[in-house]
Image (spheres, grey):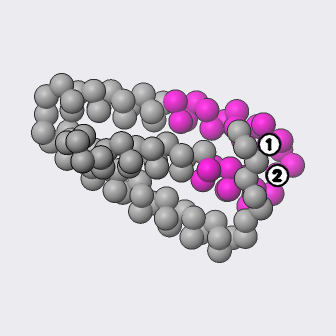
Amino acid sequence: MPRTPQQSWPELAFASWLLMGEASLVVGLRMMRLMLGGARADREARRMVNEKIAAGLTLGPALLAGGFGQSSEALGATVLAHYAKPVRANRRRLARRGNR
C-alpha cells in the first residue's frame, strides 16, 4: 500500500466528508441497479457483498503494514485511502452512460 501523506485533523475531516458524499452516490446508483432486477442486479448484489468482505479483510494488514507507532492522523489517512479507491472506481463504473 502506498504511503499516505501526513494530514491534519481538518484535512482528514474534509476527506471523510468527500468520501461520504461519494459513497452515498454509489449507494444510490447501486440501488437503482438493484431495483431494475434481472441478471445485472444479481451480479451487482454479489459484487457488492464480495467487495465489502474483501475491503474488511484487507484493511487489517494494510494498517499493520504501517506499524503500531503510527499517529492517529496517519491511521485515519490510511483508512480513508484504503476505502477511497474502490468507492471511486464503483462510482465511475456505475455512472457510465452505457452501463444502465
Task: Provide the secondary structure element on which disc 2 rests.
Answer: loop
Q: Position of residue 77 (x, y in %)?
A: 68, 56
Above/below status of 69 relative to 10: above
Q: Which residue occupies 87% across, 49% down?
A: 69
Q: Quadrant of the C terminus?
A: top left
For the record, the magenta segment spans 54-81
Q: Position of residue 4 (x, y in %)?
A: 73, 53
Q: Is residue 80 magenta?
A: yes
Q: Is residue 34 magenta?
A: no
Residue 66 circle label: 1
Specify whether residue 73 is in view.
Answer: yes
Badge 1 local density, few (<14 within 10 Å), some, or many (20+)? some
Asked if marks 2 and 1 touch (Cβ < 8 Å), the reply is: yes
Specify whether residue 31 is in view.
Answer: no
38 horizontally vs 20: left or right: left
Name the residue tied to disc 2: 70
Q: Quadrant of the N terminus?
A: top right
Q: Which residue occupies 46% across, 49% down?
A: 88
Q: Which residue occupies 77% across, 61% down?
A: 6
Q: Which residue occupies 30% across, 46% down?
A: 96
85 horizontally vs 35: left or right: right
Above/below status of 42 relative to 34: above
